[in-house]
Image: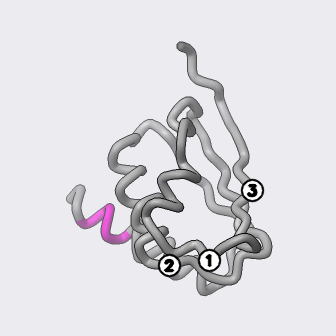
Amino acid sequence: MPRSPRTTIIVLSNVEDLITRSQAKRLMQRVERFRTVVLDFAGVTSIGQAFADEVFRVFANAHPDVELVPVHAVPQVQQMIRRAEVARDEGNA
């Protein structure tokens, strides 16, 4: 099946706190079909370390051909994303 070039996922935290790996896995279901995935964190005030790690380290390592682009993230969310990306990059070094 050919891959679509891009999709945007609106990350909603008003229903539940985004802290677990299982939440991250649900969010990332079937996004490997795209080359670029924009994750819109507008309105999200925090995410858990396990959530960030599952998306930005585990998923990213499993699907290196999928570009993950977080947007509209507040500094606290950016920090959690950066931690997961650093762990990913250190593991790939």
Residue 21 among magenta residues: no
Give the residue pinned by disc 2: 48
Quarter of the figure with residue 30: top right
- How far separated are the C-alphas under marks 2 and 3? 17 Å
Q: Residue furthest bottom?
A: 76
Q: Residue at x 64, y 25 (%)?
A: 4
Q: Position of residue 40 (x, y in %)?
A: 72, 60
| Position of residue 16 in the picture relative to residue 21 (left or right) | right
Determine which of the numbered discs, if any, sits on residue 17 in the image.
1
Q: Nearer the viewer, mark 3 or mark 1?
A: 1
Q: Check disc 3 and report the residue beneath it.
A: 10
- Say which element carries label 3: strand
**Regarding mark 1 in the picture, which secondary structure is present there?**
loop
* CB within 8 Å, label 2 to label 3: no
Tell me the amino acid under the disc marked 3.
Ile
Q: Amino acid at mark 2?
A: Gly
Give the CA separation, mark 1 to mark 2.
8 Å
Q: Residue at x 67, y 51 (%)?
A: 38
Circle 1/circle 2 CB separation < 8 Å = yes
Q: Quadrant of residue 62?
A: top left
